[in-house]
Amino acid sequence: MIENKKFCENLKRAEAGDALAMYFVATSYYDGTAPGDPFSHERLAIEWYERCVSASNYPPASKKLAACYRNQSGNERQAYEMTLRAAEAGDAESMFYVGEYYTDNEGEGLFESVLPELRDKAIAYYKRSAALGCIDAVSRLHRMGADIPEAPIVRHSHKEIFEDAERGLMHSEFEAGHLYLRDDLDYNNPALAFAYISRAAEQGLAVAHYFMGFCYLKGIGVEKDLAEAEKWFESSLSGELIRPESVNKKAALEYIEKIRKKRKA
């Protein structure tokens, strides 16, 4: 399988000290797409994210490691510290979550009370996050009655998705394709949407197979082709793909039925 080959190549580079390869390996374990015993994936994800954070100050690795720690009971303090590290390295989403810790929404028990100075710190982090385009931070500032800084058009998190897609991360390839599909964003591009979604589909992501069917059905980034659309919708229902539960099976079956009726007419 293409994904396994790519994983093995990156594992070799990671073991040789390549920090970005460490991030790729950790994320493969985190997403459950790496080969091997799935019961060991969480432990290996943490191990490789920790190695990546030690080897470099790569904000996405700190952010993902924080998420791993949050999923483990008793690791809230470590989660906070990793979130703060990612925030100080410039990650907009992590800045937002630091603000959440200070307002005691995410970090219950971490701080004894929401003191005025902590509220001020929270607002400062929300403003930094909002200035980088984090919509959640803008919403939080609005609810707190604080001034909202002008934010750029492209959200920082979107930038990270595109960067990870270029590195070959399957889920990011799909997310990038999905972003290029949106006509409410300045970088709407059907051809790029199809290209990224097809890359994720080739690696076996179930929801990407579903969207390939949709692209062929509607002619998004590719010529309309009902036969191809039917093929992709059908393949999206395979339980052997990665994350089959992510597919709207009812919608896929409805599309298949409509396509068959059209082709018979």
Image (cartoon, grey):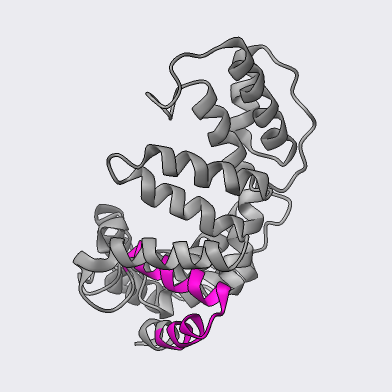
Residue 16: where, in percent of width, then height? Answer: 51, 86
Q: Is residue 223 visible?
A: no
Q: In which quarter of the image is the N terminus?
A: bottom left
Q: Is residue 194 magenta?
A: no
**At 56% from the left edge and 34% from the top edge, which residue is drawn?**
98
Q: Hey, which quadrant is residue 50 in on the image?
A: bottom left
Please name the predominant secondary structure of the magenta segment in the image. Answer: helix
Q: Is residue 104 visible?
A: yes
Q: Is residue 118 above or below residue 152?
A: above
Nearer to me, 11 or 169: 11
Q: Residue 230 vs residue 114: left or right?
A: left
Nearer to me, 145 or 228: 145
Q: Is residue 188 above or below residue 256?
A: above
Q: In which quarter of the image is the C terminus?
A: bottom left
Residue 135: where, in percent of width, then height? Answer: 62, 34
**At 55% from the left edge and 71% from the top edge, which residue is drawn?**
196
Q: Hey, which quadrant is residue 41 in on the image?
A: bottom left
Q: How many labels does the image show?
A: 0
Which residues fall within the magenta stretch? 8-32
Residue 116: where, in percent of width, then height? Answer: 61, 10
